[in-house]
Amino acid sequence: MALGIALDMLVDGSAEGRLMVLSQGLSFWGGLEPTSGMIVDNQHPQRGACVGSRILVLPAPRGSTAAPGALLECLAAGRGPAAIVLAYSDPTAVAAVLAASMIDLPAIPVALIANTDVLAQLPDGQQALVSQGQLMLR
């Protein structure tokens, strides 16, 4: 049986993949290598992990105005996440995904988790589905 967690969809869509629950925020500009999808921020606990095809769960936004470009590059290279689930609204993720859809790249869902208390309970690596305002754990 799937467990559903309510999401507020910022960019509609559906995606399936394994959760990558980050313990700290990640800046897409400088913290993510766009052509590989690898976390390269030397200070990040998940340095060396690849976000490609994962449902990326971010506890806090980090980054600059260049972050959408870096995430867009990652999506264009086919190394981006399958979906992004945010604890706090981050316009950089939304901007990158909207730009991707404008240049005929596949857009990914971006959502805000409705109850941030469940973040600590999300199992990293768990198979999940983002669809219709729900994060469903498999």
Image (cartoon, rainbow, N blue to C red):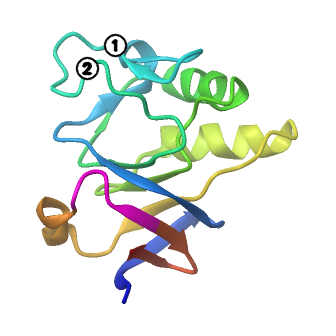
Figure quadrant of the N terminus: bottom left
* Placement of 118 over or under 71, stated as above or below: below
Query: Dot 2: few (<14), some (14–19), or many (≥20) neighbours within 10 Å?
Result: some
Which residues lie in the magenta part? 123-128
Local SS, label 2? loop
> CA gap, disc 2 to disc 1?
5 Å
- Residue 89 lies, in percent from the top left, at 38, 54
Query: What is the number of the mark on residue 47?
Result: 2
- Residue occupying image coordinates x 59% and y 29%: 79
In the rendered structure, which amino acid carries the disc numbered 1?
Val
Q: Is residue 126 magenta?
A: yes
Are the two marked residues, 2 and 1, in contact with CB atoms closer than 8 angstroms? yes
- Residue occupying image coordinates x 31% and y 75%: 114
**Is residue 75 toward the left or the right of residue 135 in the image?**
right
Q: Quadrant of residue 63?
A: top left
Figure quadrant of the C terminus: bottom left
Q: Quadrant of residue 99?
A: top right
- Residue 98 lies, in percent from the top left, at 70, 46
* Placement of 114 over or under 105, stated as above or below: below
- Residue occupying image coordinates x 16% and y 15%: 43
Q: Is residue 57 magenta?
A: no
In the rendered structure, which amino acid carries the disc numbered 2?
Arg
Query: Dot 1: few (<14), some (14–19), or many (≥20) neighbours within 10 Å?
Result: some
Local SS, label 1? loop
Query: What is the number of the mark on residue 40?
Result: 1
